């Protein structure tokens, strides 16, 4: 009996610590890992669905956590709750400034591609003012200030 009680206490302590660690790391950017995700008005299936994302790899900002739910915000500023299982740590972006260029390297002024507002892609790494990204078949560098899905201070 004592052993079962000890195991239960350890389990609850582990869950509590993991939840606290996740909350301390907020806000942070993540992405949707499924093609369809219900965004709810609160953290649970009893809350009504406010809208549905219908595409995977959309960047979202996780701003809060409760139990197995994340409160997210999209690039338009809409917020709601999604189940943690629908979220990935992979980083994606959306272009937010018109006439944003994709460059061969941060030190090279040669633009590979001109990107319009709303273009989406994957963030591979970021340093200083730049992020290495992939857009379709193109890879290159873009200024952090031109995309949503990364904080200006982040480097990875």
Image (tube, helix red, strand yellow):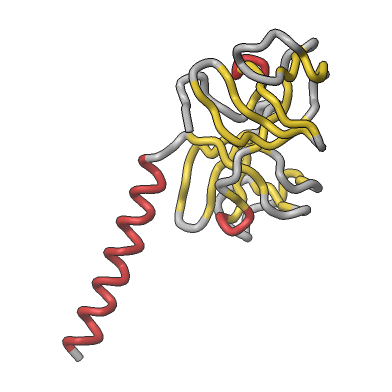
The number of discs equals 0
Horizontal and vertical percent position of residue 135 = 77, 33
From the viewer's perspective, tell me whether residue 8 is left or right of residue 50: left
Horizontal and vertical percent position of residue 47 = 63, 53
Residue 128 visible within the image = yes
Q: Residue at x 60, y 46 (%)?
A: 81
Residue at the far left in the pictured view: 2
Horizontal and vertical percent position of residue 150 = 56, 27
Q: Residue at x 48, y 41 (%)?
A: 64
Horizontal and vertical percent position of residue 140 = 70, 26
Residue 52 visible within the image = no
Looking at the image, is 145 positioned above or below residue 50? above
Looking at the image, is 90 positioned above or below residue 121? below
Looking at the image, is 19 positioned above or below residue 134? below
From the viewer's perspective, tell me whether residue 97 is left or right of residue 126: right
From the viewer's perspective, tell me whether residue 134 is left or right of residue 153: right
Q: Residue at x 26, y 79 (%)?
A: 7
The quadrant where residue 58 appears: top right
Residue at the far top in the pictured view: 109
Looking at the image, is 41 positioned above or below residue 97? below
Q: Residue at x 79, y 12 (%)?
A: 98
Taking depth in this image into account, of 107 and 79 the one nearest to the observer is 107
Looking at the rendered image, the quarter that the N terminus falls into is bottom left
The quadrant where residue 142 appears: top right
């Amino acid at each position: 009996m004592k052993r079962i009680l000890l195991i239960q206490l350890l389990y609850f302590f582990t869950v509590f610590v993991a939840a606290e660690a996740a909350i301390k790391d907020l806000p942070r950017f993540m992405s949707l890992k499924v093609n369809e995700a219900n965004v709810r008005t609160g953290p649970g299936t009893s809350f009504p669905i406010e809208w549905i994302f219908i595409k995977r790899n959309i960047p979202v900002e996780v701003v809060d956590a409760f139990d197995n739910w994340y409160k997210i915000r999209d690039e338009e500023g809409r917020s709601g709750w999604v189940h943690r299982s629908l979220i990935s740590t992979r980083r994606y972006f959306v272009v937010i400034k018109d006439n944003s260029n994709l460059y061969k390297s941060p030190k090279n002024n040669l633009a590979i591609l001109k990107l319009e507002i709303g273009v989406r892609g994957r963030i591979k790494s970021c340093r200083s003012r730049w992020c290495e990204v992939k857009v379709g078949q193109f890879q290159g560098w873009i200024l952090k200030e031109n995309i949503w899905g990364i904080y200006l201070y982040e480097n990875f």
